[in-house]
Image: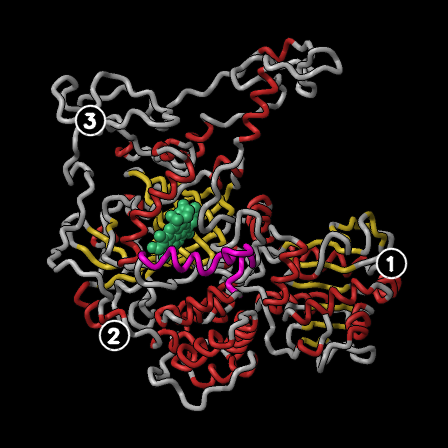
Amino acid sequence: MATDDSSRDEDEQEPERSADGGEEMESSQPGTSDSHDGELDEESKQEQLDEVRENPEGEYLTSDHGVRISDTDNSLKAGERGPTIMEDFHFREKMTQFDHESIPERVVHARGTGAHGYFEPYEDPDLEGFDDISELTKASLFQNPERKTPVFVRFSTVVGSRGSADTVRDVRGFATKFYTEDGNWDLVGNNIPVFFIQDAMEFPDLVHAIKPEPDDGTPQASAAHDTFWDFASLKPEITHMIMWVLSGRALPRAYRMMQGFGVHTFRLINDEGESRFVKFHWTPKYGTNQLVWDETQKIAGKNPDFNRQDLYDVIEAGYEPEWELGVQVFTEEEADEFDFDVLDPTKIVPETEVPVQPIGKMVLNEAPDNFFAETEQVAFHPGNVVPGIDFSNDPLLQGRLFSYQDTQLNRFNSANWDELPINRPLADRHNNQRAGFMRQEINSGKVSYKPNSIGDDDPQEASEEEGGYEHHAEKVDGKKIRNRSESFKTHFDQARLFWNSMTDVEKQNIVEAAHFELGKVDRVEIRERMVYDMFNNVDHEFAKRVAEGIGIEPPEEPGNEMSDHDREDPSLSMENRTPDTIETRKIAVLVDDGFDDEHVSEVKSTLEEAGARVEIVSKVLGDKEGEGGETVEADESHATTGSILFDAIVVPGGSDSVDALREQGDAKQFVAETFKHYKPIAALGEGTELLADVDLPEIEMAGDESDGLVSEAGVVTSQGDDLEEFLEAFVDAVAEHRHWDREPMEVPA
Ligand code: HDE
């Protein structure tokens, strides 16, 4: 019910529209009224969004049309116990809005999360063979290190529905919208640099095969079923991608710990109109880290929003997830020399052939205000390019150029989706589009056609010098043909390169992933085709190891198409991409009443100083009292959390605290699971007794007799007083991320 509070009548003035240029007068001089003159900065998109931000704080409830509402709980009735009356406009409006709240979810990449940030080009990037970035591309966002281009990034899983779990085995989408002064550039990439198929024509089949089966609608968000592997086993070109998807790349620890790739070969075009091929790479500052399979399944139950929440949490805590943008640049002549086709999206350009050269960085520093308005309504389209960036003839990319516009029409029911605030460019728009569902802009004037004399022929076309987009004038001359190029037919060579580049543990993870995925396939002939026709052409040992876990005969000889090379590319192994920092890692300190006060305060302050996020975990929530009288408040209880939601754990000393933990099955499970998932564990003083109870296999620990520090396979224990030395060893262990030199299978967790 409304109250009589006159202060609420003072409406806040709406800020002036400005950033989108919507109120500016069009000048007779084309280009002078728009943002091509370089007024952009990091805040520009936020200022534009401010114009549509709404906050009800201290305001009256109103109808959509601005009429104040006196009662929103009771419908209008003919008598207190009588029927509802049609004239109740408030009821009708509230219910209609509710009935129409949902829009179609994305057909793929339905589940996602987003954040705002900026892109900043490096000053004088060290480019091999070029003095300056302008020799490579005229795209303005790369030219001026003083200018930050606002971005919005959406990360996603591919297969699952909007409400599915974050930690499924899947490729992750990594889509970036750059609001540049020359218009929007969408780099719509993935966290894996290759794709399943070579031609857009196959995409509907791929997606139908991997999505829940059409008869019973299962399984959700998983490739582990007959239809996907049936399709895969009949498409040898899928093999390289399958290797990546079976690896830890498909189980990212966090979105901020993923590489990103443009996947296709694109073109960079300079002022002279010269073109070079390019592959785009995002390299994360926090390293490329993974979860392990057992952990992902448990997280899916305990916190299905794990990756989504992580991104918000770290931004809220003041960290700024960051990626470096790098380019691999090569000419068409160089491309002709490769033993694969750069237009084939199932191939990488190995970094051993062409180095990745960093040209700038992207920082994410602001979570969206509203999930629907921003993350759900953001609409990407690989066809959104700016002068200086162009397409290649990759047949997958070519097909995407059609599909994304089309899919947005389905999602938004209107061609005006570009007018939604999150999609709106910062560069000015002037054209002859005027109408369509939900048109927002009010275009003044009589003229909506070209050529015209009534409106001085405005808006005018821009020459290349004036910033007009010119497509690269590639010479094309061919017969119409529905065929696959011979140069696209080496399917196993790079899959073998990937396998060769893995560490032993990464190889084992791939084998185990295959045991799960193919183990879920009912039809034996599909399992056999995958092993005999695909994996046996990648690596004979690999094929045998997979066969052993899925109930089929191991192949006797290597496959006929297996290329017998032992090339490796170290950049492909995630293990080579773990930086020496514990920034943003989440660490649990297990305590109960009677903990050692000094241990807890030193552990907390040292780890936090090193950039980690530390949480006190206890059996139940509330204050816990140390043996010296200090109290700490438990951030989480055994009911609300689990080891799977942390990167590492610490068990401080304090005999009462540790005695209590030793009585708690959940505390022991915390230790056992952390061990099983290869994560760092630290214990001090009596804390080591909890570890001893769990009976960790073959790990030496500091015992009662030994004062010293023992650090083995990421288990750091000490009975001594040298906390500094202990914490240094633990910080090193956390920085390593996972400790694969363990035998976790003996641990029953
Ligand atoms: Fe997409 N893809 N895709 N895709 N894709 C979509 O567009 C499509 C492909 C990627 O966070 C859809 O707006 C076709 C490769 C991302 O909103 C749709 C083909 C790569 C996202 C579509 C591909 C991607 C999408 C669904 C083969 C990595 C999420 C909703 C020819 C380079 C963007 C939408 C977001 C989304 C079509 C293949 C990345 C249907 C036809 C290769 C990150 O248009």
Q: CA distance from mark 3 to mark 2?
A: 48 Å
Instruction: Tell which of 576 and 516 is nearer to you.
Output: 516
Question: What residue is at 23 percent from the left and 44 percent from the top?
Answer: 387
Q: Residue at x 27, y 69 (%)?
A: 488
Distance, label 2 to label 1, CA atoms, is 66 Å
Viewer-nearest residue: 172 or 358: 172
| Tag shown at residue 339 | 2
The vertical placement of 300 against 293, above or below, is above
Check if residue 205 falls in the magenta segment.
yes
Left/right of residue 223 with respect to residue 357 in the rendered view: right
Relative to residue 430, is residue 678 depicted above or below?
Answer: below
Q: Position of residue 589 (x, y in %)?
A: 73, 59
Residue 42 is situated, as x and y percent measured from the top left of the image, at 41, 38
For label 1, the residue is 594
Tell me, yes or no, whether the two marked residues, 3 and 1, touch with CB atoms within 8 Å. no
Kindly identify the residue that appears in the image at 34 percent across and 85 percent down.
560
Q: Where 55 sits versus 137, above or below?
A: above
Task: Give the residues in magenta.
Answer: 200-224
Q: Quadrant of residue 628?
A: bottom right
Q: Is residue 541 left or right of residue 642?
A: left
516 to the left or right of 190: right
Residue 256 visible somewhere in the drawing: no
Depth check: give the residue in front, 111 or 352.
Answer: 111
- Tell me how far mark 3 sits from mark 1, CA to CA: 75 Å
Give the residue at mark 3.
459
Look at the numbered disc 2 and give the secondary structure of its residue. Answer: loop
Residue projecting furthest to the bottom: 556
CB atoms of marks 3 and 2 within 8 Å: no
- Which mark is first along the chain, 2 or 3? 2
Disc number lying in front (3 or 1): 3
